[in-house]
Amino acid sequence: MALSDLLYPDNPKRKQELIHLHQELLDCMSTNFHATNELVGVLNEHLGSTITPIEMRESSTVKENCEIIIQVMSEIQHQVQKIDSDMKDKLEPVLYQKLYDIKEPELEKIAIAQRVFSIIFGEATSTAAMVAIKLLGSDHLTLTVSKLIGVLAQIGASVLGGVSITIIGLGLEMILHAILGAVERSQLLTAVRSYEKHLAEFKAASEKYQRAIHEVTSLVRQQVQ
């Protein structure tokens, strides 16, 4: 038994807990990568975007993977802002306001958006217009993207950020070394609490983000069936 385990009897339990929390973090991040790529696919196919899909880099750190997803989420935000700008430029003020009027029928909003896209692209499908309206009218998606970007930035800047993605398959002590680095084993409880705090925030923000994306992608699937 390690000397630190003799001095701190709860260490073995905390070691297992820390590894479990790290795996939860990676699983959650992987799901976010997948959800983001689904939205990217919709934007590229229906709105003419050219956003490059992303994938987790197993040879990189948590921070580096956070930066990858933050970058593409920022591109998505930029695309939504561009759609709004196009609508504002091409529409009369009254029609533009209708796009954000919650009392206005959605079919009318889609028809308005379709006219704008027809001017920009020469032609436009109702699916493209529907996606645009969903993105413009979804404060939920806008807020969840902003929230998740903030949480990812916090994770990247924390002690978690320097941890490598590739730990699965390593021995227990090697995994702990990869996670803790220079952190003393006596500080295992601090490390566990840090993981718990960031993971709780990350999971909550991720669930909202994934639901918001699902609202858009499920509508598209229904439209094309």
Image (cartoon, helix red, strand yellow):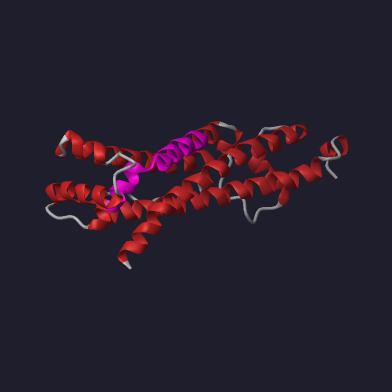
Q: Which quadrant does the N terminus fall into? A: top right
> Depth check: 78 or 13 in front?
78
Q: Residue 189, how many percent across, how many down?
A: 75, 35
Q: Residue 158, how many percent across, how many down?
A: 58, 32
**Residue at 43% over, 41% down:** 140
Magenta: main secondary structure equals helix
**Residue at 66% over, 34% down:** 194
- Asked whether residue 114 appears in the rendered view, the answer is yes
Q: Which residues are magenta?
A: 130-152
- The single residue placed furthest to the front in the displayed view is 103
Is 218 situated left or right of 111 in this image? right
The answer to if 134 sits in the magenta stretch is yes
Q: Quadrant of residue 101?
A: top left
Q: Residue 58, how many percent across, how many down?
A: 51, 50
Q: Which quadrant does the C terminus fall into? A: bottom left
> Depth check: 72 or 138 in front?
138
- Asked whether residue 53 appears in the rendered view, the answer is no
